[in-house]
C-alpha cells in the first residue's frame, strides 16, 4: 500500500515521456516492410559506386604514371569544385584517387537517401492522412519521427558497413576505408536531422524535401567554393557538413576529428526536429500555408496557359540550377587559364582542344546541353504523371484535343529549353568576361551554348514520340539517353568510347563551337529528326487510349 | 422520341487484356432526362463513361453521344458536355478556384455569377491550394466547374461519393435546376436511394452489361419494400394479398416483401391485428441484384480501377 501511494508522483512524468514513443517498434517494422525494395536499392547503390570505381580505375589508368596523369583532373580548381579538396594527389594511389574523386558522391548519395527516407515516413504520411490512422491508434506524438530516424540510422549503418567491406576487399587501407564508411554514414545521419527539421516546417512533403535539398545544395556550394580556393580546402570548406566529411582526408591524413563535427551536427538537428515537432499540431506546419487566388488568371483558360503554369515550377527550378552552375563556371574562367600551364593531355581530351580557353568555352556549351537534356526528360515525365493521376482525363474531357494538350506542353518545354540555354550562355559569358576582362567571351559563350540546343530538342522529340507510342518507357529511355549524352560528352575521349556509342548521343553530332566551326548541317538534321519524332508522338497519342490501367 | 438520344450505346464491348470490362452493353439516354446509371463497384460504369468521353476506344459496338462519335469528334462534343470523375485529382499547387475556372474555360464559357453562387452553396473556399482539400472538397471543385459551365450533357461518375448529407441536398437541388434548364444528366452511382430521388429513368449495369432499364414505375417490380411487423394477433392471411411476396412468420413477427402500389391494402389488413412495431425499408442495390440475378451479382466482382 505504502509503495503504491508513493510511486505515482515519481512515475507519472516518466510514463508521459515514454508514451510519446509508444509503438515505435511496430512503426520501424512497418517502415522496413514498406521500404523492403527501396532501401536495399539505395544501400546497394553505395556499394555499386565503390565496386564500379574500384574496378574501373585500374582499367582507366593501368600504371601509376597514367594515374598521376589524370589526377590533375581532380586537383585542378574545376575538379576540386565538382569533387573535393583533392588530398594526396601529388603521390596518387587508386585509393586516394577514389577518395578524392568519387567518395564525395557517396556523401551526396547518403544525404539524398536520408532526406527522402525521413520525409517519406514523416511529412508524406501526415500529408496523405495515413499517419492520422496511425496516430489515432496507440502511438505517441514522436513515434513516427523516432521510427523514421531509427530506420535512417539502420540504413546508414548498413551503407557504411557495405562501403567499408567493399573498400577493404579492393585492398584499400583499413583506416582510410573506415573513415570513408563512417563519414558516409554520419553525413547521411546529419541530413536525416536536416530532414527532421524541414518535415516540421511545411505541410507538404515536396516542400519539405525541397528545403532539405536546398540545405544540401548550399552545403555543396560552400564546399565547392571553399575547395576551389586551395588544394586541401579553405576555411569556407569547414562551413559545410559535406566539407567536414571530405576533410577526413581518407588514405592521406586520416583525420577523425571532422566526424565529431558531423555527429554533433546530426545530434543538434535531430534534437531541433523533436523540439519543433512538440510545438505544432498534427498535420499542421510551422510555416502556415497562404491562401491563393480565388479566380484563375485569364491565361489559364487556354491549354497553352495551363501547360505553362503546370510546367513553370520545374522550368524555374531546373533553369535557376543550370544558370547558377553556368555562372560559377564562367567566373572560374580566369582560374582555369592561370592553372593552364601545367594542364595534362587528359584534360585537353575533355575539352577537345589544345587551346585552353576555346576548349573551356566549347566544353561549357556541351556541359549545359547535358543538363538541358535532363530538364527535358524531367519535364516530359510530368506528362506521364498527369496521365497516371487522372488529371489528363479531366482536361481531355473538356474541349481540349489530344493534339492541343500534348503539343502545348511540348512547345512550353521546347521554349523553356531554348530560353534556359540562351540565358545561361549569356550569364556564363558575362561571368567569364567579368573575371578575364575579355568581353568577346560573352558572344563566344552564347554561341557555344546556342550551338548545342538542338541536342536537347532531339531528346524532347524522342520523349514525345515515346509518350505517344509506349508511355511507360519515357522515363527509363529518357534518363538512359541523358546518362549516355553526359558520359560521351565528358568522358568520350578519355574512356576512348567506341564510335557507335558516341553516335547515339545527339550532342556528339553537333560542332563544339568555337573549337570547331559552327556547322548548319548537323543542326538541321537534328531539328528535322525532332520534328519527325514530334509528329510521330502526336499522331500516336491521338490514336492511343488515355490512362488505361 | 423523334429527337436523337443524348447517349446511345449498342453492343459495346471493351476488353482490358484478357478481362472483359464491358460485354455487349446497351444504354440509351434521352435528351433532357436525368438517367441513373446504377451498378455495384467494378460493374463497368466508369469504363462506360470513359468510352463516352473518347478516352478509351470501343473494341466493338456503336457509341453515339449527342449524335457524334466520341472517339472522332471528341473535342466538338466536349464543348457541349461536362464530366465529373469519381476520383477527382487536382493540381496540388493550383487553388480550388483556379481549377474550377480552368476546367470551365477549357470547356468554353464560364458563368461567373453562377460559379460564385455555387461556391457559396457548396461552402467551398476557393482560395485554398488543392493539395489541402479533402476528397469531398476536390469533388466539389469538379462539380461546381461542371455545373457552372453552359453544357447540354453532364456525365457524373459517382459525383457525391465524398460529400456529406447536407451537401448531398445542395447537389440534388443543383441537378434539378440544370434539369429544368433542359440539361441531360447521366448520373452513375452504386447507391439506389441516391439515384431514385433524381432519376427519371434508371439503367442497372452488372458485370459489364445493362440488365435492367426503365423508369422507376417500370422498375417497380424491383423496388419492393421489406416490411417487418409485430402484431398482437397472428397474421397468416397477409400472404394471400396480391402485392405481398416472400412471406414468413416467426414468433408473432411477420416479414414480407411489398410491391410499391400495395401499401394501402397491406396496412389495412395489418391494423386490425394490433400493430406493436413496424419497420419498412427499401431494398438496397445489393439485395435487388442478389434477388434477381443470384449470388454472382454481388461481391464476386472486382473493380478494374
Image: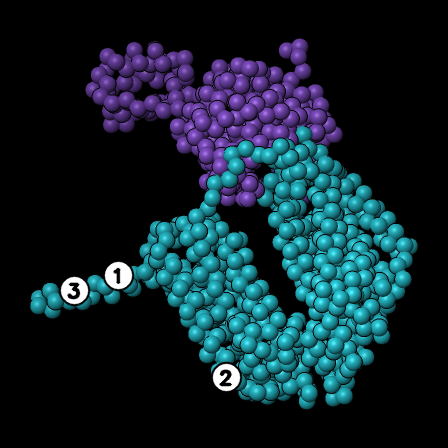
The residue carrying pointer 2 sits among few (fewer than 14), some (14 to 19) or many (20 or more) residues within 10 Å by Cα, namely some
Between marks 2 and 1, how big is the CA–CA gap? Answer: 39 Å
Q: Quadrant of residue A501?
A: bottom right
The colour of chain A is cyan
Q: Position of residue B45 (x, y in %)?
A: 57, 32
Q: Is residue B165 left or right of residue A383?
A: left
Q: Secondary structure at mark 2?
A: loop
Q: Give the residue number, with chain letter if any, for mark 2.
A: A256
* Chain ID, purple in image: B
Q: How far apart in space, not on screen, are marks 3 and 1 (Cα)? A: 12 Å
Q: Are marks 2 and 1 on the same chain?
A: yes
What residue is pinned by disc 1? A16
Q: Are marks 2 and 3 in contact (CB under 8 Å)?
A: no
Query: Distance of mark 2 from mark 3, alpha carbons?
Result: 45 Å
Q: Are marks 3 and 1 in one subunit?
A: yes
Residue named by callout 3? A9
In terms of sequence position, does the residue under pointer 3 or pointer 1 come before the other?
3
Check the picture and name the quadrant holding the C terminus of chain A: top right
For residue A480, side relative to residue A521 (left or right):
left
Amino acid at each position: 500500500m505504502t509503495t503504491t501511494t508513493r510511486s505515482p508522483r515519481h512515475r507519472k512524468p516518466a510514463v508521459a515521456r515514454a508514451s510519446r514513443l509508444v509503438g515505435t517498434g511496430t512503426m520501424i517494422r512497418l517502415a522496413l516492410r514498406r521500404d523492403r525494395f527501396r532501401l536495399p536499392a539505395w544501400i546497394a547503390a553505395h556499394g555499386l559506386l565503390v565496386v564500379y570505381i574500384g574496378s574501373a580505375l585500374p582499367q582507366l589508368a593501368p600504371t601509376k604514371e597514367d594515374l598521376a596523369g589524370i589526377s590533375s583532373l581532380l586537383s585542378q580548381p574545376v575538379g576540386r569544385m565538382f569533387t573535393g579538396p583533392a588530398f594526396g594527389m601529388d603521390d596518387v594511389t587508386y585509393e586516394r584517387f577514389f577518395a578524392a574523386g568519387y567518395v564525395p558522391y557517396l556523401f551526396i548519395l547518403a544525404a539524398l537517401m536520408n532526406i527522402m527516407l525521413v520525409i517519406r515516413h514523416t511529412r508524406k504520411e501526415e500529408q496523405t492522412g495515413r499517419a492520422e490512422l496511425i496516430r489515432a491508434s496507440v502511438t505517441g506524438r514522436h513515434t513516427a519521427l523516432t521510427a523514421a530516424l531509427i530506420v535512417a540510422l539502420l540504413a546508414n549503418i548498413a551503407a557504411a558497413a557495405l562501403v567499408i567491406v567493399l573498400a577493404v576487399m579492393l585492398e584499400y587501407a583499413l583506416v582510410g576505408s573506415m573513415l570513408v564508411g563512417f563519414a558516409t554514414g554520419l553525413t547521411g545521419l546529419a541530413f536525416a536531422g536536416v530532414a527532421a527539421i524541414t518535415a516540421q516546417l511545411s505541410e507538404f512533403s515536396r516542400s519539405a524535401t525541397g528545403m532539405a535539398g536546398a540545405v544540401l545544395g548550399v552545403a555543396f556550394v560552400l564546399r565547392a567554393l571553399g575547395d576551389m580556393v586551395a588544394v586541401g580546402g579553405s576555411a569556407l570548406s569547414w562551413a559545410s557538413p559535406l566539407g567536414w566529411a571530405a576533410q577526413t582526408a581518407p588514405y592521406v591524413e586520416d583525420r577523425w576529428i571532422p566526424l565529431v563535427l558531423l555527429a554533433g551536427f546530426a545530434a543538434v538537428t535531430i534534437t531541433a526536429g523533436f523540439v519543433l515537432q512538440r510545438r505544432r499540431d498534427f498535420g499542421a506546419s510551422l510555416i502556415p500555408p497562404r491562401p491563393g487566388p480565388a479566380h484563375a488568371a485569364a491565361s489559364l483558360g487556354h491549354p497553352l496557359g495551363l501547360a505553362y503554369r503546370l510546367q513553370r515550377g520545374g522550368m524555374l527550378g531546373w533553369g535557376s540550377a543550370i544558370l547558377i552552375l553556368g555562372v560559377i563556371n564562367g567566373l572560374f574562367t580566369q582560374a582555369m587559364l592561370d592553372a593552364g600551364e601545367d594542364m595534362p593531355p587528359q584534360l585537353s581530351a575533355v575539352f577537345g582542344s589544345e587551346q585552353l580557353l576555346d576548349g573551356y568555352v566549347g566544353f561549357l556549351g556541351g556541359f549545359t546541353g547535358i543538363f538541358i537534356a535532363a530538364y527535358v526528360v524531367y519535364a516530359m515525365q510530368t506528362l506521364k504523371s498527369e496521365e497516371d493521376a487522372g488529371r489528363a482525363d479531366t482536361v481531355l474531357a473538356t474541349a481540349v484535343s489530344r493534339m492541343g494538350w500534348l503539343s502545348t506542353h511540348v512547345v512550353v518545354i521546347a521554349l523553356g529549353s531554348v530560353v534556359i540555354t540562351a540565358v545561361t550562355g549569356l550569364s556564363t559569358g558575362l561571368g567569364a568576361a567579368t573575371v578575364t576582362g575579355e568581353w568577346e567571351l560573352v558572344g563566344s559563350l552564347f554561341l557555344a551554348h546556342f550551338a548545342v540546343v538542338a541536342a536537347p530538342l532531339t531528346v524532347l522529340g524522342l520523349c514525345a514520340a515515346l509518350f505517344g507510342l509506349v508511355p511507360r518507357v519515357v522515363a527509363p529511355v529518357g534518363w538512359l539517353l541523358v546518362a549516355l549524352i553526359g558520359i560521351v560528352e565528358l568522358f568520350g575521349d578519355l574512356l576512348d568510347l567506341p564510335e557507335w556509342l558516341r553516335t547515339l548521343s545527339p550532342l556528339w553530332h553537333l560542332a563544339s563551337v568555337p573549337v570547331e566551326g559552327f556547322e548548319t548541317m548537323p543542326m538541321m538534321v537534328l531539328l528535322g529528326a525532332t520534328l519527325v519524332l514530334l509528329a510521330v508522338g502526336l499522331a500516336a497519342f491521338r490514336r492511343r487510349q488515355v490512362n488505361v490501367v | 422520341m423523334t429527337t436523337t438520344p443524348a447517349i446511345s450505346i449498342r453492343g459495346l464491348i471493351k476488353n482490358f487484356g484478357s478481362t472483359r470490362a464491358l460485354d455487349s452493353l446497351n444504354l440509351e439516354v434521352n435528351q433532357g432526362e436525368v438517367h441513373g446509371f446504377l451498378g455495384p463497384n467494378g460493374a463497368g460504369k466508369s469504363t462506360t463513361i470513359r468510352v463516352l468521353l473518347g478516352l478509351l476506344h470501343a473494341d466493338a459496338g456503336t457509341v453515339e453521344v449527342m449524335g457524334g462519335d466520341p472517339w472522332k469528334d471528341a473535342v466538338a462534343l466536349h464543348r457541349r458536355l461536362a464530366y465529373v470523375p469519381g476520383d477527382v485529382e487536382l493540381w496540388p499547387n493550383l487553388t480550388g478556384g483556379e481549377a474550377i475556372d480552368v476546367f470551365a474555360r477549357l470547356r468554353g464559357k464560364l458563368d461567373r455569377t453562377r460559379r460564385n453562387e455555387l461556391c457559396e452553396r457548396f461552402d467551398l473556399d476557393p482560395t485554398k491550394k488543392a493539395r489541402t482539400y479533402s476528397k469531398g472538397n476536390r469533388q466539389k471543385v469538379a462539380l461546381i466547374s461542371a455545373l457552372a459551365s453552359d453544357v447540354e450533357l453532364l456525365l457524373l461518375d459517382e459525383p457525391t461519393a465524398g460529400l456529406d448529407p447536407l451537401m448531398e441536398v445542395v447537389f440534388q437541388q443543383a441537378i434539378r435546376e440544370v434539369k429544368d434548364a433542359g440539361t441531360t444528366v447521366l448520373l452513375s452511382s452504386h447507391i439506389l436511394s441516391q439515384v431514385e430521388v433524381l432519376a427519371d429513368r434508371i439503367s442497372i449495369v452488372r458485370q459489364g452489361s445493362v440488365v435492367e432499364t426503365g423508369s422507376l414505375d417500370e422498375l417497380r417490380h424491383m423496388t419492393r419494400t421489406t416490411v417487418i411487423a409485430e402484431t398482437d394477433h397472428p397474421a397468416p392471411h397477409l400472404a394471400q394479398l396480391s402485392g405481398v411476396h416472400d412471406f414468413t412468420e416467426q414468433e408473432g413477427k411477420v416479414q414480407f416483401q411489398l410491391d410499391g402500389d400495395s401499401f394501402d391494402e397491406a396496412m389495412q389488413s395489418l391494423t386490425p391485428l394490433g400493430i406493436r412495431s413496424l419497420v419498412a425499408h427499401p431494398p438496397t442495390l445489393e439485395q435487388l441484384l442478389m434477388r434477381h440475378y443470384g449470388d454472382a451479382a454481388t461481391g464476386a466482382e472486382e473493380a478494374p480501377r
